Every structure is written in structure tokens, then in C-alpha cells.
Image (cartoon, rainbow, N blue to C red):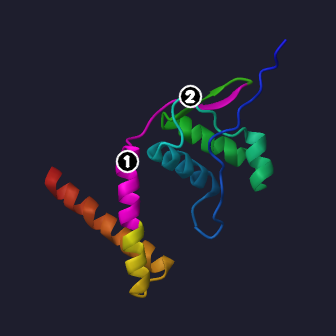
Amino acid sequence: MEVDKELPSPIEFRLDPGSGVPTYLQLVQQVEQALRLGYLKQGDQLPRVKDVVAGLAINPNTVLKAYRELEHRGLASGRRGQGTFVDGALPMVGLREQEALRRDLLRWMRTATAAGLDEEGIVALVSSALHDLHAENEEVVA
């Protein structure tokens, strides 16, 4: 009789205690990013609550809250006795296009660093540019 072995989840969570973002939202954001980048797909199992708790030394209720939020967003669902699985999808760019964009972004980041921006400065500039892009898109829609 063959024992059903559990496959490891394709995602491993990490926390940034200095980000100011609540822990459960950091987990939610990481799942969303993994979906957008193609690291996670429908049917993939998320890490078991006990494994996340052990790996990150956080309260199990925090992980459960994150998984409930993912369920609320239509991105995951729990299966009694089996774990939590990816159910939904988010828009993503093809891997070839993604890699080209990543190369361009790295080139831009090197230029920004050479111009004197540190990591926080780069994040601030990108955030500002994203804000402007959203404002432009809202004007087009209105």
C-alpha cells in the first residue's frame, strides 16, 4: 500500500517586521504576488498552518486570518483535513515578457542607484510613479 506523500508548497512565506504592514496581510500579498508571477497556480497547496507557524514563529490565528482573507478574495479554499489550496487566478504577464520587463527594471534600478537613490528612495519614486499612473488611468476612464 502506497502512502500519499504531501508535496511541499511552491511558496515559502517571509516577514518584514519593519514594513508596517500587518503580518496576515504580508502573507496575503505574497500569495497574490506569487499568483501574478506564475509561481503559484490553481490547485497548488499553500503551506500548512502548522508549518507557517513553526517557520515564522507567529500565532496560528494570524495564518488562519490570512487564509480566510484569501478565501474571501476568491483566491483559495480550505479542504477539511487536507489544507488550503489555490482556487483563483490573478492577471499575469507571460514569462518571456515578464523576464524582459524584469531586465529593464533592473537596468533602471542600477541607474537610479548610480544617481544616488537608496532602496527607500527607489521605493518612494516607484510608488509616486504608480500613483501618477493610477491617476492617468482614472482620467481616461472618467
C-alpha distance separating marks 1 and 2: 23 Å
Work out whether residue 114 or residue 129 is closer to the camera in this orientation and state it.
114
Rendered image quadrant of residue 105: bottom left
Where residue 82 appears, x then y in whole percent? 71, 25
Circle 2 Cα neighbour tier, 10 Å, few/some/many (<14 / 14–19 / ≥20): few
Residue at (62%, 40%) from the top-left corner? 67
Magenta stretch? 82-105
Q: Secondary structure at mark 1?
A: helix
The answer to whether any part of residue 142 appears in the image is no
Work out whether residue 117 or residue 141 is closer to the camera in this orientation and state it.
117
119 vs 124, left or right, is right
Residue at (49%, 49%) from the top-left corner? 33
Numbered badge on residue 43 = 2
Work out whether residue 35 or residue 64 is closer to the camera in this orientation and state it.
35
88 vs 44, left or right, is left
Rendered image quadrant of residue 137: bottom left
